[in-house]
Amino acid sequence: MLKGLAITPPLLGRISIGKIVEKNGKRLPEKDDQFTITSQVQNRDGWLLHPLNEKLRNGQDGKLRSIPIRLLFNEPDLNFRADYSLFDRSTGRPLCVGNGETCKRLTKDGIQSLPCPTPDGCPLAQGHACKPYGRLNVVIGDEDPLGSFVFRTTGFNSIRTLAARLHYFQAISSNRLACLPLELRLRGKSTRQSHGTPIFYVDLTIRSSMNMVEVLQAANELDAQRQAAGFDQAALDEAAQRGFGNGAFEDSEEDVGAIVEEFYSAEESPSPATNTSQRSSKTSLAEKLEEQAQRYTLPIDTNPGHSHAPAQNKSQ
C-alpha cells in the first residue's frame, strides 16, 4: 500500500443537491430542491447524469427527493467522515484538516499534527476559509456491493443529522448498520438567517415502504445470510480504517478542484481591498501557516486517527 495515499471506497458516482452554473462569466454554486445522481465523467456543461438518476426519479413526480441505499460499513465514522477543512483556493490543495481538537496541517516542513481551535478560534479560518466538510458513502442497488456513491456537504444541518442517525441506527441494530435497508431523504426548513426561504439538507431514515420492525428483521436476515456465505464485515471495516488512515488528507488533487468550486463560491474569496493581488494573498496565507506551525510545533503524527466532522451553497 502506497504510504501517504488515502485508500477510499471505490466510487461509481456522486450525489448532490445543487449544481454549478455560469453567471456573468463566473462559475457559481446554485442550490436545488432535489437530489441529482451523476457519474464521474464531466464535460463543459457539468457532470454527466448517472443512469440511476432517471431510474429512481420515475414515480417521484419528477423530483428525486429520496434514494434507497445501504451502507458499506458497520462503523458510522467509516461511512461518514466529517472534519474542518481549509483549502488553498488558488490550487485546490487541502492545507489543514482538523476535528476541533487536533489537526493535520501542511507546512514547509511537511504535514504536522497541531492543536485545532475550530474555525471560530483559528486565525487561518478568517473569511470562512475553513468549513465543516462531510463525505457520506452509500451503496445504491445491488450491482456492485462494494462500489459507492459519495454525497459531499458543508452544511451543518446535513452533517449533524447524518452523524446522529448513523450512531442511532448502529445502536438499535446491534451493530448491523451495513445490513439495514435505509433511505436518503431530502428535507427542507426555514430559519431566521434564510429569511423565510427554505434551505435543504439530507437526512437518513428507514425505507418509506417499511416500518422499524421490518427493517430490523431484514437486517438480521441479511446479516445471517452474509455470515453463512463467509462475508466478514468486521474485516471489511478494519480494511477501510487502515485505508483512510494511510493518507494525510482523504481527497485527492483530482477531487479538490471540484470541491472548492462547488463549496467555496467566488463571493467568498478574499476582497481586493484587503488583498491587492493574488500573489500577496498567497503570501499572507503562507505566512499565517508558518506562524502557526512555529507556535504550535508538535511531533508529526505517524499514525493519525481518523478525524471526524463539506456541498452546497444555501442547501445544507
Image (cartoon, rainbow, N blue to C red):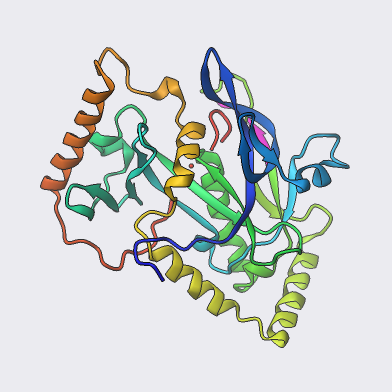
Query: In the image, residue 147 lies at what x, y percent?
Result: 64, 61
Quarter of the image where one finds residue 231? bottom right
Residue at 34 percent of width and 36 percent of height? 88
Q: Which residue is at the far left?
A: 294
Residue span colored magenta: 186-191
Tell me if residue 200 can be seen: no
Looking at the image, residue 163 lies above or below residue 301: above
Query: In the image, residue 205 lies at what x, y percent?
Result: 69, 53
Query: In the image, residue 269 lies at what x, y percent?
Result: 37, 23
Q: Is residue 165 left or right of residue 302?
A: right
Question: In which quadrant will I find the C terminus?
Answer: top right
Q: Which residue is at the far front?
A: 43
Q: How many marks?
A: 0
Residue at 38 percent of width and 45 percent of height? 84
Residue at 43 percent of width and 20 percent of height? 267
Q: Is residue 283 left or right of residue 76?
A: left
Residue 248: within the magenta?
A: no
Query: In the image, residue 2 lies at what x, y percent?
Result: 38, 67
Quarter of the image where one finds residue 123? top left
Question: In which quadrant will I find the N terminus?
Answer: bottom left
Looking at the image, residue 116 lies above or below residue 195: below
User: Principal SS element in the magenta part?
Assistant: strand
Looking at the image, residue 31 lies above or below residue 171: above
Comparing 179 with 260, the one in front is 260
